[in-house]
Amino acid sequence: MTVLSRLSALPTFLKAILASYPTSIQDLRNPRNLARLLLTLAFLSSLRKSLLSAARSQAVRGCSPGIISVADKDAIREILVTADYPKSEIHEGFELYDQHNVFSSRNKSFHKNRRRLVAPAFGLQYLRSLEPIMQDSVQILMNKIDEILENPKSVKKGTKVLPRGHINMHSFMNRLSFDIIGKSAFGESFDMVLNDSHPVPKQMAKALKRSMQQSFNPWIRWLIPLDRSFIAFGCERVRTRKTQGEDGRRADLLQYLIDAQARERAEGNGETGDEYEDMIAGKLTDRAVEAEAVVFLIAGSETSSTAMTNTLMYLVNNPKALKRLCDELNQATATNQKGSIPTYDQVRNLPYLTACIHESMRLRPVAATGLPREVTEDTVMGGYKIPKGTIVLAALQELHWNKKYYPQPSKYIPERWIPEESPFPDYPIQDFTFYPFSAGTRNCVGKNFAMMEMRLILATLLINYDVVNVPGQRTDYVQFITTAFATESYVIKMTKK
Ligand code: HEM
């Protein structure tokens, strides 16, 4: 990369810094803000690699020595599917108790074994048992929204009281997805929708941000150790469930892991007692069950909530699409009682609902800046020689915004996903141009869970409330592990139907 191109990228870099810590420059006389800014600068000096590349549109781009960003569809397919390159060392930031887990692992045989064990928990059949969990949780959300609509001051003490009818959807989607994954992975809701006071979600968000910083700058580890209290919480819940035996049985993800462990042991394939050997072999030891349950919590909370808030944001800004979706939902649930929650069967095959979710995940994929992988042999990508050991970022947002595949790429046009209605008949959606859940052996194991959750929740809200845009809000993003609204707020005006 030339000096000139580095300089031209400076504004993007500075913008990224400001967006990452909106308060850090407001008053640098405050030592806390200054310290945050310095820390951020150190962190972003590495993270810029992905941010710079996302700011431009090029098939293959050098980010810094050893790291390139790739946005060409064939090259991304090669990285994720055909060559199936292993994850990069950045993922080691997700190791819990220094153990591999299905998300963090870079070791292919470990991953294959572990994935084989956990994947059936996300099979469509098993997921059906989670439907009541999702329905109960969204019912609690509706009750809470109704309470706030009735009395705007009924938000948690210390939280900003919004004008009547205004609901901070970013906050509620976040809290709801924590409650759902808490119940699904540990059998216990965090009651975030009701009380917004459980310490675990906050501890987790903080620890993940820090762990991302540590992945890029390991020296931070010595300065600020990671607060792992949320992991201890998860483990404690897993142990409690196990000690309850048959009495504690529930139909959820944790039960699936516990049963899988019991099956492995019964078949004589259980752990040998050698901790290291068992870990490498991917055995479902007690530690492994705890780690996987905690990983579901990490991978399955902010991801879904951001995707849902994004979809609502695009819908309230596109009234025609919103109206069409509401018509589809009303028709599909016409026989339901007023105020009720749809069943998954009623909403799982609705083409326009799926199109609306796809279009928002195209525009704002949760892993926007790219999925890092390590090239294991010298290769050629997009006409460039790529030496072994290079980290390649599969740049999803750039791919999703490429006008070669998506005309008018920045516009929210759900119809483009319905072939017979697409305004771009000459541009049918092509295979391998859309990767919100990644692809290949490391694709999102929770995809079906997430799609079920998003369909049920969005449908319930739109059947029961009129939703309207509140203009003038900031919608810029920060990217740590996933993309998130920089202001941690997105407000929608709601009225009960
Ligand atoms: C809209 C919601 C979601 C999106 C957009 C999403 C996206 C992704 C992406 C892009 C990856 C690949 C990451 C990488 O290669 O570095 C991934 C992996 C993963 N996701 Fe999701 N995810 C979502 C929801 C969930 C949920 C609800 C769960 C679990 C309950 C989950 C569990 C996982 C796990 C365990 C992996 C690692 C899979 C492996 O490496 O074998 N995700 N997800």
Image (cartoon, helix red, strand yellow):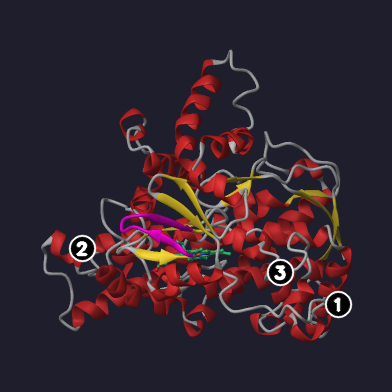
449 versus 62 height, above or below = below
Closer to the camera: disc 3 or disc 2? 3
Foreground: 188 or 104? 104
Which region shows up in magenta? 383-393
What's the CA distance linking mark 3 and mark 1? 26 Å
What's the CA distance linking mark 2 and mark 1? 51 Å
Residue 116 % position (x, y): 33, 77
Foreground: 205 or 233? 205
Residue 89 % position (x, y): 33, 52
CB within 8 Å, label 3 to label 1: no
- In reply to whether residue 389 is colored magenta, the answer given is yes
Quadrant location of residue 239? bottom left
Q: Tell me: 231 left or right of 457.
A: left
Residue at the (22%, 70%) spot, across then down: 283
Residue 107 % position (x, y): 27, 64
Task: Say which residue label 1 marks.
Answer: 327
Task: Say which residue label 2 marks.
Answer: 279
Quadrant location of residue 178? bottom right
Residue 100 % position (x, y): 28, 59
